[in-house]
Amino acid sequence: MAHTYTTLDATQLDTPTAYRLLVGMVVPRPIAWITTRSRAGVVNAAPFSSYNYVAHSPPMVAINIATRNGELKDTARNIVETGEFVINVATVDTMEAMHGTSAEFPSETSECEALGIELLPGQTVNVPRVALSPIHMECRLERALPLGRGLNTLYLGEVLAFHLSDTVFDGRYVDSVKMQPIARLGGPLYAALGELYNRPQLQQPPK
Ligand SMILES: Cc1cc2nc3c(=O)[nH]c(=O)nc-3n(C[C@H](O)[C@H](O)[C@H](O)COP(=O)(O)O)c2cc1C
């Protein structure tokens, strides 16, 4: 089928339009359900889908956190102030709680307390992990990179510890199908895994 394209000058788009297009086309996005602790000790949780792993030696992840009304979101402020965060993998089982933590709670209110989210202590960082999530990555801030016109900052984290539930980990592989990850699409939509396609690997995995 031949496509008929709408071509837009991406350099001239207003910010809401650029956002609307990007979140519709860069899909499905994995969700980092991030826990942090404020300097005052309040545990914060919020989801971020502008996220991926970006290095494996050492393991590193990156999350873009936008400002809100010109100010850092609680997650970003806590990461900058403490240098620590935990990524909890979002799954079908954690979706409702994860989504609930995206509401704008005041900084002094813990989403985890307000929503009754059970926590486990961190081991290498002073940030708790979400007990319902089968995988946690304890991270230290490696660097924060301000991007573009000042709305976005990319937070790069080095993973200091992985915690893998034996419901999804056999000692060697993560069973990502069993894990039932949940992904973000544009607008209000989430997606679970759909059809799977199995093809032999045509390249060597990195050493
Ligand atoms: C599924 C999902 C993904 C999100 N991804 C991002 C993101 O990548 N970057 C961002 O700045 N906000 C993102 N948000 C919005 C934040 O979760 C929201 O602003 C939240 O209130 C921030 O909480 P905090 O102030 O406690 O850090 C996302 C929201 C949802 C529901």
Image: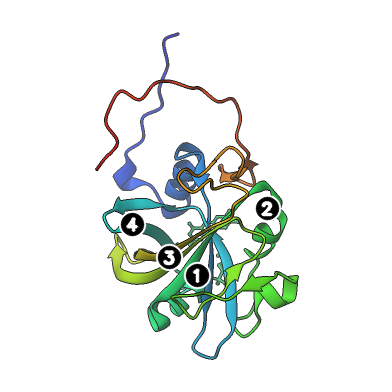
Q: Position of residue 122 (x, y in %)?
A: 52, 74
Query: Cβ(mark 1) to ligand 1 < 8 Å?
Result: yes
With respect to residue 141, does 180 lie above or below?
above
133 or 192: which is nearer to us?
133
Disc on res. 59: 4
Q: Is residue 71 visible?
A: no
Residue at x 70%, y 70% (from the top left corner)? 118
* Disc 2, SS: helix
- Sequence-wise, the earlier of marks 2 and 1 is 1
- Sequence-wise, the earlier of marks 1 and 4 is 4
Q: CA distance from mark 2 to mark 1?
A: 23 Å
Residue at x 67%, y 73% (from the top left corner)? 112
- Judged by depth in the image, the label closer to the viewer, 4 or 3, is 3
Q: Is residue 202 visible?
A: yes
Which residue bears the numbered disc 2?
A: 95
* Disc 1, SS: loop
With respect to residue 192, does 121 lie above or below?
below
Q: CA distance from mark 2 to mark 4?
A: 25 Å
Image quarter where the N terminus lies is: top left
Which residue bears the numbered disc 1?
A: 68
Query: Cβ(mark 4) to ligand 1 < 8 Å?
Result: no
Q: Callout 4: few (<14), some (14-19), or many (20+) C-alpha neighbours within 10 Å?
A: some
Disc 3 vs disc 1: Cβ atoms closer than 8 Å? Answer: no
- Judged by depth in the image, the label closer to the viewer, 2 or 3, is 3
Residue at x 54%, y 48% (from the top left corner)? 169
- Sequence-wise, the earlier of marks 2 and 4 is 4
Which residue bears the numbered disc 3?
A: 161
- Judged by depth in the image, the label closer to the viewer, 1 or 4, is 4
Disc 4 vs disc 3: Cβ atoms closer than 8 Å? Answer: no
Type of amino acid under label 4: Pro
Q: CA distance from mark 2 to mark 3?
A: 23 Å
* Disc 4, SS: strand
